[in-house]
Amino acid sequence: MQQIDRDENIEASKRRRGAIKQRQFSTFLFFSRHSVLISKSGHAKHPTMNSNQLDPRQHPLEAIGAAIGAEEQTELQTRSSNFQGADEGPASVIAKVSGAQSGGKREDGSSDLPNNKGTPRPNPTYSKTVGGLPLVSDTFLLQKQQHFNRSKTLERVVHSCGAGAFGYFECTRDVTELTKANFLSSVGEKTPVFVRFSTATLGREFPDASRNPRGFAIKFYTKEGNYDIVGLNFPVFFCRDPIQGPDVIRSQSRNPSNFLLDHDALFDFLANNPEANHAGIMLFSDHGTPQGWRFSHGYGCHTFKWVNADGEFMYVKYHFIAKHGQKQFTDSEAMQMCGEDPDYSKRDLWEAIEKGEDIEWMVHVQIMDPRQADPDTLGFDPFDVTKIWPRSEFRMKELGRLVLNKNPENFHRDVEQAVFSPGSMVPGIEDSPDPLLQFRMFLYRDAQYHRVGTNLHQIPVNCPFMAKSYASPFDGPMHVDTDRAGSKQYPLNSFAHKFRPDTDEAPYEVNDNFVSRVSHYWHEGKKNDYDQVRDLWTRVMSDQEKKNTCYNTAKGLGRIKYLAQVYIISVDYAQGIYNLLDEPRFEFSKVKKLGETKFAEAADDWYKEPKFRDKPGSKLVGYPPEIAVYQP
């Protein structure tokens, strides 16, 4: 008898579990009814999507509807449809806004204009008063003003002035032998992207045609998560040690005493940091004043690591070459445009997309075998972000095309709240031994948590809507997603094992195991810090480009020490700037003397602190380990 009871209990338990699964599947159908077709297997299929597109998650409002049985109650469903349609989940919104899924801009189909509690407003122009004095009991008035007071997010501490657009990346070369990144595995594969362009300093409202480095940030929405490339329109940066990152920005920002532009600060920084002059010459050339966003090349700047399915890796650098070539303003043209149309770059991008114009970059990579990554052999440090890889030695190889074809639906939601981080990588793409990259992988995410919040993945533009997994964070302010759909909040548990050992990082060697402040940069304290910028001046730049660079530099220069740096790069470069100074404060002979002294081996006091220079063998390395790191 007891055995019969136990058998009946087991059967009853099975029936209950079956009923629960059926309800869960019904809820899934309800979640997906606005944006996906459901196959018999229960997997989402999008009618207009390619193979890189999966199920976008829906909004918790629909989950509430399912919980109260709204999908079975026509009246409740009708009454709730307007609010649900206006407040789709982030994945559904970004799937439509990015163009990955069909669906135009949302339209207001409601019969009235409510507040954010859904209560209809009686009148748009009159407050509730007593004797004409407004009352704090007027919830419509207070809610409207309180929300207005808090409607601006924090301005980005860098790259605050910008614009963005959606489009796609199309892979034109199968590189599975080099990387297991799924969006690079098939020729013709299209991956939705969002690209944000920006100026680096001087504020959100500053004219966007002014002389400034340009940010070039790309978010790839892949099946294995979002991948961000956060680069510039220069292939190099102004510093290589992360401790100097804030100094770079402050040297190009306003004077804290009077809030005026301070050219002396920039020249002083360049004068005391030889590695900064490669990016410095590009800033003072016409590359510092591009004609809008779409006629400028983009670069990943850092060295990255591609890892294939066998755990073998190569180092790569990204190049985004504008299909229609580069166009730049001269200094006078840029100044004129800043006055006539401070939003020129934003307007140009928006209007070009609205007109359906062709906006495209060809994507190339340079590839280096890790066994080649020896600066003693190369003559340059491949992990130094102030240096390039010579194209004559590391040929450009086509990877794909980047196309922009869709404007944002709402600037605040889609552009202002967009976040990027060099640490947002996907399986098959990893970091290199570049110290600045290593720290940027942390600091960008930290800055975005401060500016937008820890649940930034729930903002549509940041949502990894192509990925098939839920985000892992729990709770936090404005957390409204499913908390991983009921999964345990501690990952190693007895109920599920949802891990991918095949996504582990490929190990590489570092040079030593000493904790110190000794530099591991091969160029530190050496004359060869000037080699590449000298080549740029003498071998790459045209006579007109040289003339413009000298003019642009002379406009703000008042420091002999910077001109001594330029003298080391090239005598005619320094002489060209000096000849354009309106009222030189010093004789050129002093520049010559200082430059020649600085270039001498004994000039330790001019060239950073000798104590921290790299020692023999202290170079950055990234070789594959000679012994196995993981158990077979």
Image (tube, rainbow, N blue to C red):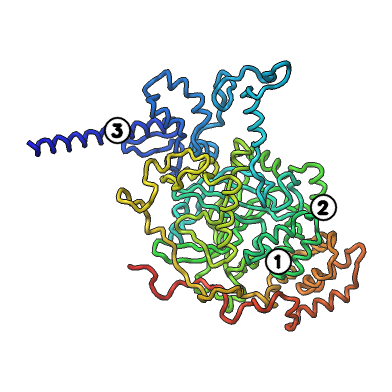
Residue 350 vertical position relative to residue 73 in the rendered view, above or below: below
Q: Which percent across, then down, holds residue 354?
A: 64, 36
Compared across the picture, whether 426 is left or right of 278 comes to left
Amino acid type, label 3: Gln
Q: Which mark is residue 276?
A: 1
Return the residue nearer the eye: 587 or 243. Answer: 243
Inspect the image, locate mark 2, and give the three-letter code of the amino acid beneath it.
Asn
Label 2 residue SS:
loop
First of labels 2, 1 by sequence position? 2
Q: Between 5 and 347, which is closer to the camera in this rendering?
A: 5
In the displayed image of the protein, which residue is found farthest to the left? 1
Disc 2 to disc 1, how far (Cα)?
26 Å
Image height of 591 relative to 331, above or below: below
* Disc nearer the start of the sequence (1/3): 3
Total numbered circles: 3
* Quadrant including the N terminus: top left
CA distance separating discs 1 and 3? 63 Å
Kindly check if marks 2 and 1 are in contact, taking CB atoms under 8 A apart as contact. Answer: no
Q: Which quadrant of the figure has residue 563?
A: bottom right
Q: State the residue position of label 3.
A: 22
- Which numbered disc covers residue 258? 2
Which residue is painted at 57% across and 77% down in the image? Answer: 618
Give the crowd class for mark 1: few <14, some 14-19, many >=20 residues within 10 Å.
many
Dot 1 amino acid type: Ala
